[in-house]
Image: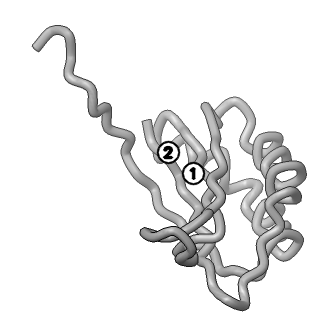
Amino acid sequence: MIKVSIFYPNGDDIEFDVNYYRQQHFPLVRSKLGAALLDDAIEVGICGAHTGEIPAFAAAGHLYFESVEAFQTAFAPHMKAIQSDLPNYTNARPLLQVSEVVNTKESDHA
């Protein structure tokens, strides 16, 4: 399984509309990616390493797929529609990372 993470850097001049992201953008993404999208999650930064410290990221979105190929096949036809919604919820320039999800629990068969 892979996880596609979209990180939205934070800063004094960064605006991020969490409600729009949750209520409008993620449903758009789900409808475009269809059954290839296995799961998703949203994280909203609340602080950095210390209470009161600005978080490095205003928010992050996570999309789970069976493989990189499944992500690319589902995303490519809808890339413009998904990306064109960006100005509706943030002025941040997102960073994207594709990661392999690794199980940290030891197998019962070890």
Query: For the residue carrying disc 2, how many other residues have a C-alpha within 10 Å: few (<14), some (14-19), or many (20+)?
Result: few
Tell me: residue 93, above or below residue 101: below
Label 1 to label 2: alpha-carbon separation: 5 Å
Would residue 30 be found to the left or right of residue 102 on screen? right
Residue that badge 1 annotates: 72
Snapshot quadrant of residue 16: bottom right
Residue 69's disc is 2
Extreme residue in the top direction: 109
Residue 61's disc is none
* Percent of width and height locating residue 14: 72, 83
Tell me: residue 43, above or below residue 101: below
* Percent of width and height locating residue 97: 47, 62
Snapshot quadrant of residue 78: bottom right
Extreme residue in the left direction: 110
Q: Secondary structure at mark 2?
A: helix
- Kind of residue sitting beneath label 1: Gln
Number of numbered callouts drawn: 2
Q: Are marks 1 and 2 in contact (CB under 8 Å)?
A: yes
* Percent of width and height locating residue 22: 81, 51
Residue 98 or 71: which is nearer the viewer? 98
Query: For the residue carrying disc 1, how many other residues have a C-alpha within 10 Å: few (<14), some (14-19), or many (20+)?
Result: some
Extreme residue in the bottom direction: 13
What residue do we see at 83% from left, 69% from top? 89
Residue 49 or 110: which is nearer the viewer? 49
What residue do we see at 52% from left, 75% from top? 56
Q: Secondary structure at mark 1?
A: helix
- Tell me the quarter of the image containing the C terminus: top left
* Percent of width and height locating residue 2: 45, 42
- Kind of residue sitting beneath label 2: Glu
